[in-house]
Image: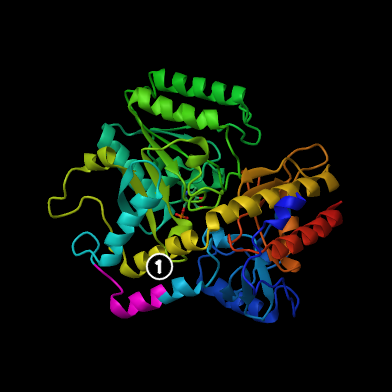
């Protein structure tokens, strides 16, 4: 570990820890939240007063004012360290000057294009860059503005390529919340229940190896049994190969709790898809673009999917996503006959594409992919040490690179979402922004900007140690 430490990149010169000058949340945050709740649908932003006793959360959110690198400032002037990457988006750090510069320059030149009718140069360049950065022969893209829309573009492509509308997806999966994506999402029951009748009825969910409480552990044997079950699903009259056209999976489950399946399972999915003529769709919206220590998590397993979905970090903070597919699969759409049968008003927005190009350049030029691998290996070791200090409270460290999870458990070793939320709250009060993940909300997720410094992470670990001690 000492050796690894010596070789760790130090991060940006200005990489301060938290500085809190008011109670959290401060008075200005509270005043803004008071205003927000009058005008926003109440389902969106959670308030302390609206939260049930069960959740254990005892504070209102803070309101963000600005951000730089791995630091966020709220409207009261408090400075935080961001361990969330703002939903794993800001891999290259907040307000990166190269990205802000590209956005400013493009916004002076051309803000909006006409995606499928009159494309702009940044859209064309981004399409080429995506073919270059994605593995294997992935080459042709459909651009979109959210992760969910990229997943839906991939699912539609699978229908065009196979003529089949059935989909195999996995328990614990998070693919987004718009209808098509939500039909495949199986993360929280409450997300799906009111809308269930409107979903594609041909989505079948199978257990993901390593899932909390699931039947298949993340072992070779678990992988084998899961693959046998999928074979059985494909052979069964209800869901047989006659109707299934796609397998949609996350190479590492993100919101599901940073769950890493065995490589043999992912390679087995590839073989299964090949044997049955299915389109293998890897959702790398969370895991892609360096977060796991490779450009794409699929590369850890030596697998090239037929379609790879990318989003979050792609836009450098602007909403840009894409489904990038093999030529043969994408060409199943046929040629546009003048009116594209799949498009949207903002498809290939020039400012978004310019920002994405700058983000991809930053990831490459600042060597953020190897940085995520090295810093992630160090953080993984530190989390193991933390687990040794709190053996009753913490489960096994999961994930790869800077996509790591630390499960919080109760005295019986069961997932403890209530305690997880208390830890997240305790960290916020110490100036560290964290989110819980996992179907029970019990996993402390680490998805910081990849430029975060080792010192900032070390400060977070110290704070976490204290917060965990207070739980006992
Ligand atoms: C793996 C994965 N897919 C899809 C999505 C949905 O992306 P969006 O919220 O941009 O629609 C997410 C969001 O967290 C995700 O983690």
Marker count (numbered): 1
Q: Is residue 203 above or below residue 320?
A: above
Q: Residue at x 30, y 42 (%)?
A: 157
**Left or right: where 416 falls relative to 291:** right
Residue at point 55% right, 66% down?
A: 93
In this rendering, would 249 be left or right of 384? Answer: left
- Read off the residue under disc 1: 355
Highlighted range, magenta: 102-113
* Residue 105 is a magenta residue: yes
- In the image, residue 435 sits, relative to residue 438, either above or below, namely below
**Magenta region includes residue 418:** no
Measured as percent of width and height from the top left, residue 270 is found at: 42, 30
Is label 1 in a helix, a strand or a loop? helix
Please, what is the dominant secondary structure of the magenta stretch? Answer: helix
Tell me where residue 18 appears, x and y as whole percent: 72, 72
Q: Residues within 10 Å of mark 1 (few under 14, many from 20)?
A: many
* Frontmost residue, 380 versus 277: 380
Measuring 73% from the left and 47% from the top, which residue is drawn there? 381
Q: Is residue 347 visible?
A: no
Cβ of mark 1 under 8 A from ligand 1: no
Q: Relative to the observer, which residue lies in front, 196 or 140?
A: 140
Where residue 45 appears, as percent x and y from the top left, is 57, 65
In the figure, is residue 350 to the left or right of 458? Answer: left
Q: Quadrant of residue 12?
A: bottom right
Q: Quadrant of residue 44?
A: bottom right
């Amino acid at each position: 570990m000492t050796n690894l430490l010596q070789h760790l990149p130090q991060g940006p010169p200005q990489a301060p820890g938290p500085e809190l000058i008011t109670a959290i949340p401060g008075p200005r945050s509270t005043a803004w939240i008071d205003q927000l709740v009058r005008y926003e649908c109440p389902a969106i932003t959670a308030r302390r007063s609206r939260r049930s006793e069960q959740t254990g959360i005892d504070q209102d959110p803070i309101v963000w004012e600005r951000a730089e690198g791995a630091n966020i400032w709220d409207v009261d002037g408090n400075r935080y360290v961001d361990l969330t990457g703002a939903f794993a988006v800001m891999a290259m750090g907040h307000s990166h000057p190269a990205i802000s510069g590209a956005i400013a320059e493009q916004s002076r030149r051309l803000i909006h294009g006409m995606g499928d009718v009159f494309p702009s140069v940044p859209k064309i360049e981004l399409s080429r860059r995506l073919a270059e950065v994605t593995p294997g022969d992935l080459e042709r893209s459909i651009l979109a503005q959210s992760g969910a829309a990229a997943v839906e573009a991939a699912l539609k492509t699978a229908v065009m390529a196979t003529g089949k509308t059935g989909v195999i997806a996995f328990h614990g999966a998070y693919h987004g919340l718009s209808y098509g994506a939500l039909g495949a999402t199986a993360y929280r029951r409450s997300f799906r229940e009111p809308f269930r009748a409107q979903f594609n009825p041909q989505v079948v969910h199978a257990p993901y190896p390593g899932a909390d409480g699931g039947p298949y552990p993340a072992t070779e044997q678990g992988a084998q049994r899961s693959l046998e079950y999928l074979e059985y699903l494909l052979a069964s009259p209800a869901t047989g190969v006659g109707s299934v056209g796609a397998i949609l999976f996350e190479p590492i489950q993100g919101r599901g709790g940073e769950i890493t399946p065995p490589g043999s399972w992912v390679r087995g999915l590839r073989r299964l898809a090949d044997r049955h003529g299915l389109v293998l769709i890897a959702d790398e919206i969370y895991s892609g673009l360096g977060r796991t220590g490779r450009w794409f998590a699929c590369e850890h397993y030596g697998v090239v999917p037929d379609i790879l979905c990318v989003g979050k970090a792609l836009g450098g903070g602007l909403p840009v996503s894409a489904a990038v597919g093999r030529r043969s699969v994408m060409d199943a759409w046929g040629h546009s006959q003048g009116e594209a049968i799949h498009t949207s008003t903002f498809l290939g927005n020039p400012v978004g594409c310019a920002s994405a190009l700058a983000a991809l350049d930053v990831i490459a030029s600042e060597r953020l992919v190897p940085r995520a691998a090295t810093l992630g290996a160090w953080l993984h070791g530190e989390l193991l040490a933390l687990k040794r200090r709190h053996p009753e409270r913490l489960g096994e460290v999961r994930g790869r690179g800077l996509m790591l999870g630390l499960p919080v458990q109760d005295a019986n070793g069961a997932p403890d979402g209530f305690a997880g939320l208390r830890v997240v709250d305790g960290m916020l009060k110490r100036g560290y922004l964290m989110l819980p993940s996992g179907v029970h909300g019990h996993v402390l997720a680490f998805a910081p900007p990849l430029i975060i410094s080792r010192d900032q992470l070390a400060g977070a670990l110290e704070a976490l140690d204290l917060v965990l001690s207070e739980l006992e």
